[in-house]
Image (cartoon, rainbow, N blue to C red):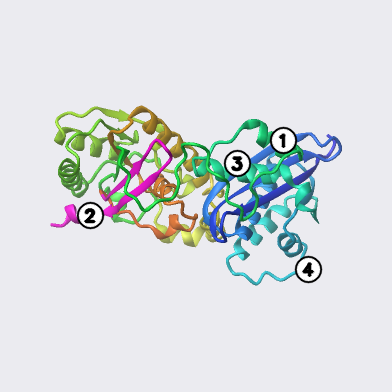
Amino acid sequence: MTPLRVIVEADGGARGNPGPAGYGAVVREANSGEVLAERADALGIATNNVAEYSGLLAGLRAAVELGASEAEVRMDSKLVVEQMSGRWQIKNPGLRPLAAQAAALVRRFDRVTFVWIPRERNKHADALANKAMDEAAGITRAVGARAAAARGGGVVAGKGEPAEPAAGSARPSWEPPVTTPTRLLLVRHGATALTAQRRYSGRGDVPLSEEGLAQARATAARVKSLAPAISAVVTSPLVRCTRTAEVIATALGGTPVEVEPDLVECDFGEWEGRTFTEVRAQWPEEMDAWLGSTEEAPPGGESFRAVATRVRRVVATIHKGYPESTVVVVSHVSPLKILLRDALAAGDAFLHRLYLDPAGLSIVDMWTDGGVAVRMVNETAHLAS
C-alpha cells in the first residue's frame, strides 16, 4: 500500500481575546490537493492561541484517522508553528497541555513538518473556524459568500473580528426580553448506590437508591411550584433518569414522558463502575488526556465532544418542537454540564469546574432569535432535610 501523505491546514480564532472562539482544519492529499477531511467546532470562550492549537489538534487527529504516514502542517500562526517546531519556548502554561497533546499525535506519524503560511493562503481553514463561531452564535450567512471566501474570492470575519449578525439573530442587550422563550428545567437524576461510592456511572443501568427516590419527589414538588404548566418531560433512557422523570410527571398530573436516547450519560468505557481514585491510579496518563481535551475518550469510551454533538441535537429538537413552552429535561452530569457550558458560551474548563448535585435543578431559556439566558444553576434548596 502506498503511504498516504497529507497537508493539514489549520486555524482558529476568537472574537475578542479571550472571546467566543472556534477552529477549523482541512486535510488534503499532498499531491492532488483533494480535500479528504474537514473539521470545525466552537470552543466557547477562549483565546486566539488556544483556538489555533485546537485547530491543529483537530487536523492531526483527522489525518491519523485517515491513516496518513506523513503530514505537512500549514498554519498562519507563527507562535504555534515555532513552538511545535521546537524553536520557541511555550511560556504560557495554558498552552502546554495542548502542545503536549499535539506532540503525542505527531509521534503517530513517520514524519511531520510545520510550515508558516500567510493568512490569505489559509482561507479554507479560516472560513471553517468562522462558520463554527457563527453557528454557535446563531448567525447565518449566504453559502455563496462563504464558499467564495474559501476559494480566496471573498472576505470573511477572521481572528478577533466580530462577524455582523444576520437579520433576526440575537444581539447582546441588557433589556429583558418581552417574548416568551422555550424554557428548559434541567434535572439531574436522583442519587444511586454508585453516587455515594464516588464511582464512574455511565451506561450502567443503576436504579435510584431510597435517598435518590426521595430526592426525585422533592425535585418534583419544586418543579411544580416553579412551572405548573409543563408541556413534556424528556428523559435519558436509563432507569435512574426514567424513574426520576416519572415521579416528576406524576406530580404534574400526568405530563407526557418522552425517552430521548441522545440524553444518555457519557460512555466511560473501562472506567465504568470504578472509583475516581482507582481510575487515577490505573490510568493516570489517559485521565490527564481526558481532562485536557474534550476530544479524548476514556479507554473504550466516548469523548465529551461526541456527547456534545448529541446533546445539541436534543436541544435543537426541543426548541423546534416546543416553542414558547416549558420542558423538563432529566439527564446525567455530562450532558447537563455540556448543555450549560454551551448556554453560557463557556470554555471546556467549565466542564471540570461545575458541580451538579443529584436532583439539582437548573433553568435555561431560549428564544427564537438565538438569545439564551441561564436563570439558575444547580439549585438544591428543595433537597434540604
Q: Residue 131, labelled with which disc?
A: 3
| Magenta region includes residue 47 | no
Position of residue 300 measured from the top left corner of the image (x, y, whole percent)? 53, 43
> Mark 1 or mark 3, which is nearer the start of the sequence?
3
Q: In the picture, which quadrant includes the C terminus?
A: bottom left
Circles 4 and 1 in contact, beta carbons < 8 Å? no
Q: Which amino acid does label 3 sit on?
A: Lys
Q: Residue 148, labelled with which disc?
A: 1
Alpha carbon separation for disc pair 2 and 3: 38 Å
The picture quadrant where one finds residue 197 is: bottom left
Residue in the picture at 17% in, 37% down:
228
Front residue (pair 6, 149)? 149
Q: What residue type is labelled 1?
A: Ala
Mark 4 crowd level (few <14, some 14–19, many ≥20, 10 Å Cα):
few
Task: Tell me which segment is drawn in magenta.
Answer: 360-385
Q: Residue 87, labelled with which disc?
A: 4
Front residue (pair 336, 206)? 336
Position of residue 141 measured from the top left corner of the image (x, y, whole percent)? 58, 36
Residue under label 2, please give it: 380
SS for callout 3: helix
